[in-house]
Image (tube, rainbow, N blue to C red):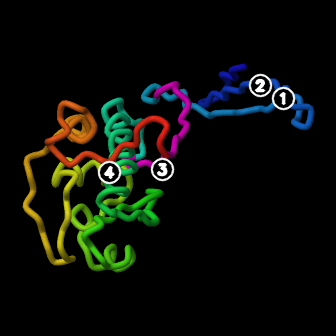
Amino acid sequence: MVDLTGEEASVTSLVESSDPNVAAAVERTARVSLSPTSSLAPSFTRHSRRSGGGNDNDDEKKDHKYASTIWDEYLKKDKGWKRGNGAGTEEWSFFPGSLLENPGVIKKSGEKGIHWANGWGGLVEMLTTYGPNHAPSSLTDHPEQMPKVPMKEIYDKLFEEENVAAYPAPARANKGEK
């Protein structure tokens, strides 16, 4: 139903519920201005926990999937990386295994992007900047940046059979072995 009286329009939609414990209908209303300079589109705000707050593009989603696999199968298992509570809206922070301090000290005294990564996007940035073998020796160490390498290339070098020699590959169990 659309009410076009006055300078504002009210758009109401009814949603039927199949749950008997819920009211028979749920009413949602959005206000839109009808002034000549405004848009007729209702204004709804979408919040996201990911950095940037907007919709993720396909490349970013793929990069996060590559980073997740590299974290699970290589950084955590073979390189001793640690994970802790994220800062701000991020769920996780990541810390190179070469740093012996606890994550709280690393966050406080280290430099984000070098000594720790905030969220999956931060891990992607750290991996593409320093590579999967990134291992600062201390919180004052600032390793030299390498030319940026796409996440797919890093992933392929770690996990594809033809690229096994590029980086040390994680150990793999044969089928039937635990």
The correct choice, above or below, for 169 with respect to 141 in the image is above
Q: What is the secondary structure assignment of the residue under circle 1?
A: strand
Give the residue at x 87% y 36%. 22
Name the spot of residue 68 as percent of width and height, x first: 39, 45
**Magenta residues (range):** 39-52
Q: Are marks 1 and 2 in contact (CB under 8 Å)?
A: yes
The correct choice, above or below, for 157 with respect to 88 in the image is above
Name the spot of residue 131 as percent of width and height, x first: 18, 51
The nearer-to-camera label among 1 and 4 is 4
Residue type, numbered disc 1: Ala
Residue type, numbered disc 3: Arg
Q: Mark 4 points at which residue?
A: 74
Q: Residue 49 carries which label?
A: 3
The nearer-to-camera label among 3 and 2 is 3
Left or right, residue 63 beside residue 173: left
Q: How crowded is mark 3: few (under 14 residues within 10 Å), some or many (20 or more)?
A: few
The nearer-to-camera label among 3 and 4 is 4
Per the model, the C-alpha gap separating discs 3 and 4 is: 25 Å
Q: Mark 2 points at which residue?
A: 14
Left or right, residue 16 beside residue 32: right
Task: Name which of mark 3 and mark 1 comes first in the sequence.
Answer: 1
Per the model, the C-alpha gap separating discs 1 and 4 is: 50 Å
Q: Do the residues labelled 3 and 1 touch (CB within 8 Å)?
A: no
